[in-house]
Amino acid sequence: MNEKFEKIFIESLGLGEDFEVTEDLKPGDIQEWDSMGNLTLIGNLEEQFGIEFSFDDLMNISNVGSLKEVIRRMVEG
């Protein structure tokens, strides 16, 4: 899942292929992860992983690590 997630993350936010995605990375850390970038990212993650985030899921995401944990929980269900 990590490789797939990182590819979607980098492509959704228009980051360079050499960008390092870390667990503690949060929206305020990079300019591209703004409100529009977040909408694109969430939509692409939902499409690629076949999931649908709830409002509560989205409100509990604070960084890459928590986002990956929500996806992991939904995929493993």
Image: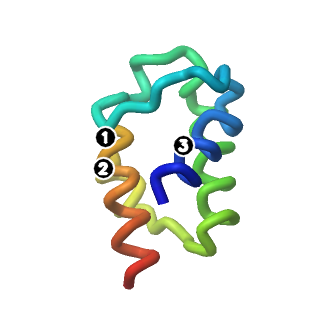
Question: Mark 3 and mark 1: span between their CA atoms?
Answer: 17 Å
Residue position for label 1: 62
Q: Position of residue 31 (x, y in %)?
A: 55, 15
Residue position for label 3: 6
Q: Earlier in the sequence, mark 3 or mark 1?
A: 3
- Is residue 70 or residue 39 the one in the foreground? 70
Above or below, 77 relative to 51: below
Q: Residue at x 41, y 54 (%)?
A: 58
Above or below, 40 relative to 71: above
Give, as a three-letter code, the residue at label 3. Glu
Residue position for label 2: 66
For the image, the number of numbered tags is 3
Looking at the rendered structure, the secondary structure element under dot 1 is loop
Q: Residues within 10 Å of mark 1 (few under 14, many from 20)?
A: few
Q: Residue at x 36, y 32 (%)?
A: 22
Q: Residues within 10 Å of mark 2 (few under 14, many from 20)?
A: some
Image depth: mark 3 or mark 2 in front: 3
77 left or right of 52 in image = left
Question: Mark 1 and mark 2: span between their CA atoms?
Answer: 6 Å
Structure colour scheme: rainbow
Question: Mark 3 and mark 2: span between their CA atoms?
Answer: 14 Å
